[in-house]
Image: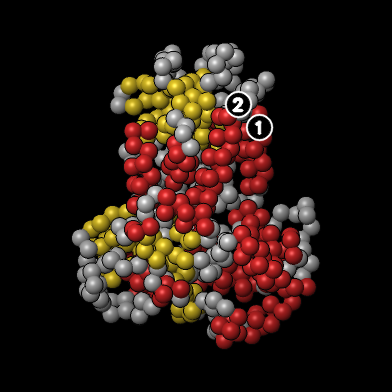
């Protein structure tokens, strides 16, 4: 494998490079067909750039997967997103999806946390908090100290667990933050960086010295930006599931998407044309394209291998970002069976409760048309950082584990009419300690290698909404580069 700034090539699989066809040129080649890649490619195309998106699998959308089985609608990845920024709503409108959008039912605002084997409502405002049985009187009293807790030293990077226990106490960590982190990241607050994984919470202490003070003052600033706090933002999906979003983007991009296409070789810009030469394999053929810019939106561990010939240290840092396995178990019931009322979004399970599931969402309560009118749909999550080994169970055994847990926690009786299981072997990037250092290395790499950009849900947020917002900023960077191209005098490459 070799790389040269003077026209020689490096090969990602040691094949021989087909020389570039000077007739095939693009302004941007995007690697990865998840929501980050699709949204970025769409914005660039709309701005008038010639784009090409390469996706190695047969399907676009990344983790967005929806399936219709009879009258059941199943989302195997993200089941919804939050309308936290006007940019998200504008984007949906721009795609012509406003009429397809469906907001969560009012009942979905009620969420439960498991405590001592019972599902207890999560308090969503101060009066509910004071009355809640989720936290002891001592824990509630402990919150009065929060405004007087000193911020951590600037040079100390804390885990979420350290931060929350220092500011709010252990009980709040165990029964609010731990299950929340399991639900969002399938992660462990003892390992995630508070600065990177929950940056807005970290910023409250940094900017205001207190979470409570910051929540009050921060609300005023969000109002000025027209942003909405996540606790108040509208949860939404689409009539036929989240895949409508990725499908709409794919439709807009048309033939500028190439699926089952694997990036194989990159030739850096020569002094003569300033264009990268990119070779990819598709249907047994090798196709070479010249492009002004390359945007990597693939998972961190995939991007790491693509960038290894450029920068081995950066590749090492990206490969350190861990993605735990998660199993999604969907249970569909044609008719309601005996169980506790499905009067909310669902429930999350704290680690201290020692159960075998991370939580269950009551899919048929959240959105309409997820199950027959007389039936119900439940989606349960297993594994993550907490118990990754459970994702290796056979389907029948995994289904039995989930049914036994739901029988115990929800008084669920009867057998489902359909069962669908999706295992994500590498599910969600973990923003662990040192994550900001890794992202700083990405920025240095982009500066040293003009025309190459790195994006994806391991950078600046994992949610669908985060990726939509990020795509705008990434598209602006690429557009600026294409209008004012720069050439690096020193190509730092490790062979």
Which SS class for mark 2? Answer: loop
Residue 235 horizontal side relative to residue 195, left or right: left
Which residue is depicted at the point 42% across and 54% down?
Answer: 93
Residue 239 is drawn in which quadrant? bottom left
First of labels 1, 2 by sequence position = 1
- Residue of label 1: 447
Q: Nearer the viewer, residue 350 or 59?
A: 59
Q: Nearer the viewer, residue 46 or 420?
A: 46
Image check: 144 left or right of 86?
Answer: right
The kind of secondary structure element at disc 1 is helix
**Residue at (50, 49) in percent of width and height:** 467
Mark 1 and mark 2: span between their CA atoms?
12 Å
The residue sitting at 76% across, 65% down in the picture is: 209
Would you call the spot at circle 2 few (<14 residues within 10 Å), some (14-19), or many (20 or more)? some
Q: Is residue 136 left or right of 48 when viewed as pictured?
A: right
Work out whether residue 41 can be spotted: no
Q: Quadrant of residue 118?
A: bottom left
Residue 207 place in picture, x, y as percent:
74, 61
Name the residue rendered at 67%, 21% in the picture.
Answer: 490
Q: Quadrant of the C terminus?
A: top right
Q: Position of residue 436 (x, y in %)?
A: 66, 47
| x and y percentages locating residue 344 in the rendered image | 41, 75
Vertical side of 429 occupied by 58: above or below: above
> Mark 2 highlights which residue?
485
Say if residue 258 shows up in the picture. Answer: yes
Q: Is residue 131 above or below residue 67?
A: below
Q: Is residue 338 above or below residue 431?
A: below
């Amino acid at each position: 494998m070799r790389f040269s700034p003077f026209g020689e090539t490096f090969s990602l699989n040691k094949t021989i490079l087909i020389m570039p066809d000077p007739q095939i040129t693009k302004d941007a080649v995007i690697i990865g067909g998840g929501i980050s890649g699709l949204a970025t490619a769409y914005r660039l195309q709309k701005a008038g750039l010639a784009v090409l998106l390469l996706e190695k699998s047969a399907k676009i959308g990344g983790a967005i997967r929806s399936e219709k089985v009879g009258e059941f609608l199943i989302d195997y990845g993200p089941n919804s997103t939050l309308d936290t920024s006007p940019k998200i709503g504008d984007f949906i409108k721009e795609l012509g999806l406003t009429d397809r959008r469906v907001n969560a039912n009012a009942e979905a605002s009620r969420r439960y946390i498991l405590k001592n084997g019972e599902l207890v409502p999560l308090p969503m405002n101060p009066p509910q908090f004071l009355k809640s049985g989720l936290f002891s009187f001592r824990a509630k009293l402990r919150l009065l100290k929060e405004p007087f807790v000193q911020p951590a030293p600037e040079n100390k990077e804390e885990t979420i667990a350290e931060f929350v226990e220092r500011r709010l106490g252990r009980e709040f960590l165990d029964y609010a933050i731990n299950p929340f982190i399991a639900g969002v990241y399938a992660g462990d607050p003892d390992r995630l960086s508070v600065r990177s994984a929950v940056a807005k919470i970290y910023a409250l202490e940094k900017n205001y010295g207190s979470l409570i003070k910051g929540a009050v003052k921060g609300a005023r600033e969000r109002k000025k930006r027209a942003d909405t706090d996540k606790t108040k933002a509208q949860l939404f999906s689409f009539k036929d599931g989240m895949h409508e979003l990725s499908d709409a983007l794919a439709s807009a991009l048309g033939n500028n998407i190439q699926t089952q296409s694997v990036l194989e070789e990159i030739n850096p810009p020569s002094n003569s044309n300033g264009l990268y030469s990119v070779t990819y394999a598709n249907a047994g053929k090798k196709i070479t394209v010249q492009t002004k810019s390359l945007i990597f939106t693939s998972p961190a561990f995939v991007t790491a291998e693509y960038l290894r010939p450029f920068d081995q240290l950066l590749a090492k840092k990206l490969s350190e970002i861990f993605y735990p396995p998660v199993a999604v178990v969907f249970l569909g019931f044609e008719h309601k069976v005996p169980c506790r009322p499905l009067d909310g979004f669902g429930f999350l399970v704290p680690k201290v409760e020692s159960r075998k599931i991370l939580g269950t969402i009551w899919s048929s309560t959240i959105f309409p048309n997820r199950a027959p009118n007389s039936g119900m749909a439940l989606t349960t999550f297993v594994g993550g950082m907490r118990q990754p080994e459970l994702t290796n169970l056979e389907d029948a055994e995994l289904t039995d584990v989930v049914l036994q847990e739901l029988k115990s926690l929800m008084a669920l009786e009867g057998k489902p009419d359909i069962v669908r299981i999706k295992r994500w072997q590498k599910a969600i990037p973990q923003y662990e300690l040192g994550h900001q250092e890794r992202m700083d290395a990405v920025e240095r790499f982009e500066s040293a290698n003009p025309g190459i950009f790195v994006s994806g849900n391991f950078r600046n947020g994992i949610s669908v909404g985060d990726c939509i917002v990020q795509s705008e900023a990434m598209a602006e960077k690429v557009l600026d580069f294409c209008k004012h191209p720069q050439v690096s005098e020193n190509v730092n490459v490790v062979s």
